Amino acid sequence: MLHIGILGPPGCGKTSIFKALVPAVVDETGGAISREIHLGQVKVPDPRLDELHAIFQRGKQVNAIVEYVDLAGFSRSDVSRGGYDAQFLGQIRSCDALLHVVRNFELPGLPKPDPLRDYQADFQEFLLSDQMIFEGKLQRLRKEAQKRKDPELGREINLMERCLEALQNEQPLRELEFTPEEDKLLRSYQSLSAKPELVLLNIAEDDIRGSDEMINELKPAIESPKVSLTVICASIEMEIAQLDRESAREFMDDLGIKESALNRLIQASYKLLGLISFFTVGDDEVRAWTVKQGTKARQAAGEIHSDLEHGFIRADVVNFKEFQPRGSLSACRKDGVRRLEGKEYTVQDGDIIEFRFAL
Ligand SMILES: Nc1nc2c(ncn2[C@@H]2O[C@H](COP(=O)(O)OP(=O)(O)OP(=O)(O)O)[C@@H](O)[C@H]2O)c(=O)[nH]1
Ligand SMILES: [Mg+2]
């Protein structure tokens, strides 16, 4: 399951965004600084899955799930400690991706809004925190290397040195290229600057119609590999999340909002993380699964169950786009668009797959 952290300085709108995304949460923390962590699971909306479920009528519909974490409460004004505290950073480290909120509305008691200032302060802080972790790690590894010769250790030291050099040059690790082995090793360090970020410019209600200009102005300074910027008005989105579908549509039309934050942010997060969905039609459920782009059929089977991966024989595949105009799997087979694929087949977004396996 995808784990997405919502972070940003005090009062930037994290909890409001969390409530817009996870409507069931009724807990009120208001503007007060709180140390609570909110956790909420959200179904990934996918109209293709809705359609498949309606056609096949097999028991439950199981959407993919994303988990959002509202990373609350710390004070940057606590200068004696300097920026974020360790507990907060630790919480961010365990996330797959970040919704990084920056405030662009006035709030009594807080400095004048300056989204770029806030973003860059966080950015520097993440680089510094990674740098400290990598320096400590490198020191330990070098000591170890003096005691014993081990080519693996040597490789890890090289990797650490490369990362550290990048960090010292203010280059976040998400911009570096790694081999799959290096990637695996690095994952255990949970580097902050390696995380993909969707930066959310949180604006005042009155600015919704002028938001394109704001975004275009900030884009060059913020967008970079695996970082993209989008706008949100958290207070409005929170209201939308509480309305029924029809009233929400009307309200959004009035305000010139095309799509709710929930749909928009999930889709943007998937794109940012290079994720795709495939579907399975079982006896008692029609279900969506999430995998990384480039996943092979056999690995995809492993998402469902390790038995399917180990005993993998073949996969029956038809893409939703081919399925939709035909409306049944047998028609797809007849037309030759549903076909058998081997373990090396690269799964495509929207594939409907039936795995064949032997136990
Ligand atoms: N005008 C305006 N106010 C907002 C918006 N989003 C949040 N606020 C207000 O800003 C205040 C702080 O919002 P929260 O969502 O609690 O912010 P937070 O980041 O969770 O704050 P902490 O958890 O205290 O760090 C609240 O009074 C919100 O009503 C917005 O889009 N527009
Ligand atoms: Mg909060």
Image (spheres, rainbow, N blue to C red):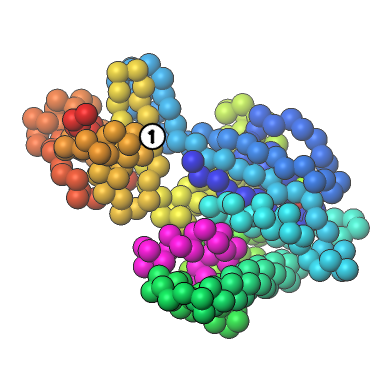
Quarter of the image for residue 139 reads bottom right
Foreground residue, 253 or 57? Answer: 57
Q: Name the image quarter holding the C terminus.
A: top left
Quarter of the image for residue 155 reads bottom left
Q: Residue 222 placed where, x, y %?
A: 59, 70
SS state under label 1: strand
Quarter of the image for residue 12 reads bottom right
Q: Residue 350 placed where, x, y %?
A: 31, 41
Whether residue 184 is in magenta: the answer is yes
Q: Residue 114 placed where, x, y %?
A: 76, 68
Instruction: Give me the residue at 38% from left, 46% from top.
Output: 291
Instruction: Give me the residue at 37% from left, 29% from top.
Output: 287
Instruction: Give me the residue at 45% from left, 36% from top.
Output: 64
Would you say residue 221 is visible in this rendering?
A: no
Which secondary structure type mostly characterizes the magenta part of the structure? helix
Compared with residue 234, is residue 45 higher up or lower down, i.e. above or below?
Answer: above
Residue that sits furthest to the front in the current view: 147
On screen, residue 215 versus residue 203, left or right, reads left
Foreground residue, 271 or 206? Answer: 271
Whether residue 261 is in magenta: the answer is no
Assess disc 1: are there few (<14), some (14-19) or many (≥20) residues with their C-alpha within 10 Å of its C-alpha.
Answer: many
Q: Is the distance from the Cβ of mark 1 to the nearest ligand 1 atom less than 8 Å?
A: no
Instruction: Give me the residue at 74% from left, 30% from top.
Output: 26
The part of the chain drawn in magenta is 173-195
Q: Amino acid at mark 1?
A: Ala
Q: Residue 333 placed where, x, y %?
A: 12, 31
Would you say residue 66 is visible in this rendering?
A: yes
Compared with residue 52, is residue 215 higher up or lower down, i.e. above or below?
Answer: below
Look at mark 1 in the image and give the residue it sits on.
288
State how many labels appear: 1
